[in-house]
Amino acid sequence: MYSKRSATYLPHHNIGYTKGMVEELRSLWKSRFVGATLFQVRLSERYQGSGLGVLWSVVAPVLTMIVIAIIFPLLMRMKVENYVVYLFSGLIVWKFISSAITAGGDAAVGYKALITKVALPSFLYPVVVVSVEFVNFVLILIALHGIALLFGFDINTHLFYLLVAMFVTLLFCVGIASFFSLLVAYYRDVRQVLDVIVQACFYLTPIIYPITMIPEKYHMIIEFNVFYQFVRIFHQAIYQPGPPVWQYMIAPAVLAIVFFLAGLAAHHRFGRQLVFRV
């Protein structure tokens, strides 16, 4: 006798977003070993052929920061106390976020060969890319403390606050990288614009100059600068001599959660179509 049971195909995009995001996270967890392999390969490829290897990823940005620390105070009309630490604490998080944006934009396109051959969760690719950038970020952060100890700079690290800031920023970077990985895959012209936007945001964010240089009436506008919210918590974690202000952590935490969930939802909706877009 033939069974009367019937199979009904439910398109992926018709699944509810909440259930779909949970499934994306489950798929990501099931693919963790593949992700670990991709991470190792990408990390080794990054320093392949380099004489200094991993050390170069620290030396290059540190040298850039030192040049800015020497030249920019000569151009400023006001003196910033302990400027080197102020500059480094803002630049390291900016480099991490900007690298996550640009590298995240290439995440899906860069893994084109793998996407067209193996069925893996599309959210995995921006996670791998950001993880590699996070390793570089941690190395530079360690180098910052080493330089501070070597030259006797007054560094005020609030360890627990710093760890929370690092986690929140990592979550934000994964979210924003996952969003741009889809956007660039669907619209390639976006990649050409990303570098320009990132560079413009650098000068619009109080990183190499303090917010006190901006007239107070414009401070409210700066508060709407997403990147400033993350730069500020790292100033609090490393530069601020007194106890850090935990209230400043609220906005970055909300932004991190929103962007992470938005990126997850976007990959649930459009991730399976990447095979036709890359």
Image (spheres, rainbow, N blue to C red):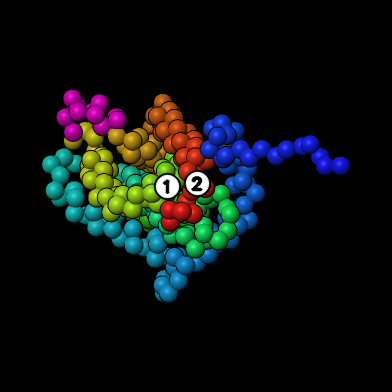
Left or right: 78 with respect to 111? left
Disc 1 marks which amino acid? Leu
Q: Main secondary structure of the magenta part?
A: helix
- Looking at the rendered structure, the secondary structure element under dot 2 is helix
Task: From the top left corner, tell me how far across and down residue 249 is, in percent.
Answer: 42, 31
- Provide the residue span drawn in magenta: 214-224
| Residue at image location 23% in from the left, 40% down from the top | 204
User: Tag 2 or tag 1, which sits nearer the N-term?
Assistant: 1
Residue 189 percent location from the top left of the image: 29, 52
Is 147 drawn above or below residue 55 in the view shown? Answer: above
Residue position marked by numbered label 1 in the rendering: 182
Can I make out residue 118 in this image? yes
Work out whether residue 164 or residue 192 is closer to the camera in this orientation and state it: 192
What is the residue that sits farthest to the front in this orientation? 1
Q: In the visual, does 79 lie left or right of 163?
A: left
Residue topped by disc 2: 271
Q: CA distance from mark 1 to mark 2?
A: 8 Å
Q: How dense is the environment of label 2, judged by Cα within 10 Å: few (below 14), some, or many (20 and up)?
A: many
Is the residue under label 2 in contact with that under label 1 (CB below 8 Å)? Answer: yes
Q: Looking at this view, is 135 or 78 the one in front?
A: 135
Residue 243 visible in image: no
Q: Is residue 215 magenta?
A: yes
Q: Tell me which residue sits at (59%, 41%) in the image.
A: 25
- Quadrant in which residue 51 is drawn: bottom left
Q: Callout 1: 10 Å neighbours few (<14), some, many (20+)?
A: many
Q: Residue at x 23, y 54 (%)?
A: 68
